Image: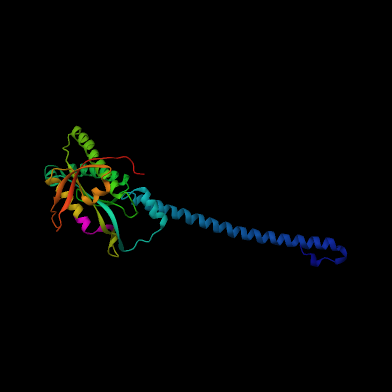
Amino acid sequence: VNVGEMKKSELNRDEQNFLSTLCTLMGLSINNSRNFRVVENELADSERLVLQKNRINERIKSIFSKFTSPNVVNTLVETQQEVVLGGESKQISLMFCDIRSFTTYCEERSPAEVVEILNEYLTRMSEIIIRYHGTLDKYMGDEIMSFWGAPLEQPNHAKLAVQAGFEMLMELKKLTLKWEKEGKKPFGMGIGINTGEVIVGNIGSAIRMDYTVIGDPVNLAARVEALTRKFNSDFLITEATYQLVKDIVKARKIGALQVKGKQEPSMIYSVEHVDLKPLY
């Protein structure tokens, strides 16, 4: 519509103003329509990016949920923390869990049988560790290393660790009954827990890194687990751990022991019972 080409005598002033206003409104409508299409396309692009991000996050959760509890994974994903080399000092509780006389056990069985029963054992034990919000560090053959108190702060890390350890022993009893019914020879295990200040973080190289812990308390936890054979106890903890869990644990003091690799003797306790009442 072009009012300018019409003779003024054919239209009065009100009609001219009306048509001029109409043209202006039509132009604004067309322009708004174009802007709306641009916004619509941008929203569609944003939606695709959100869906892509959600798929990536779900993939991350799926991978890392195999190593730690879902609530830890969700927090890590939400905070969007960059994964870099380095660590920080934290007080955590560490658990080492080992099968008794596993070398002899393997020598008496076929590799297929060993792998089958080991996979079932590791799966059950790992599920309990994750259920108690622990972080699986690594499998070393038949040995499991895990810790509590990182990557997220856990005020009750020592209690969560001993609760997990006690339930793991109960779960092994259930597995023992199952294996005996299936004609498989069961085995025992020992658990050692220590609490202390360690360096925790991504340690390794730019090519490959592990989220793990290092420090003297780690070595002590491993030594304590090894002592379970010597003192015929399935579950040993150190004085540092005991002081944080004594309100939920019934334990027998073994005494101050000279642990290999340590100059100062360490007080060790044999855990007899743990209250599994939820802490949260």
Would you say 226 lies left or right of 20 here?
left
Q: Between residue 23 and residue 211, name the one nearer to us.
A: 211
Q: Is residue 216 magenta?
A: yes
- Name above or below for residue 178 compared with residue 205: above
Query: Where is residue 176 shown, x and y percent of the image?
Result: 20, 36
Residue 34 located left or right of residue 150 = right
Q: Residue at x 47, y 53 (%)?
A: 51
Q: How is the image coloured?
A: rainbow
| Range shown magenta | 211-219
Q: Nearer the viewer, residue 216 or 65?
A: 216
Answer yes or no: is residue 120 visible: no
Picture coordinates of residue 16 (x, y %)? 82, 63
How far across and down, in percent of the image, does residue 154 sit?
Answer: 33, 51
Seen at 48% across and 55% down, the residue is 50
Q: Is residue 151 above or below residue 229?
A: below
The answer to whether residue 225 shows anywhere in this view is: yes
Which residue is at the far top?
181
Q: Is residue 60 above or below residue 189?
A: below
Q: Nearer the viewer, residue 216 or 137?
A: 216
Residue 165, horizontal then vertical, whole percent: 25, 44
**Rendered image quadrant of residue 127:** top left
Identified at 31% across, 46% down, the residue is 130
- Locate the N terminus by quadrant: bottom right
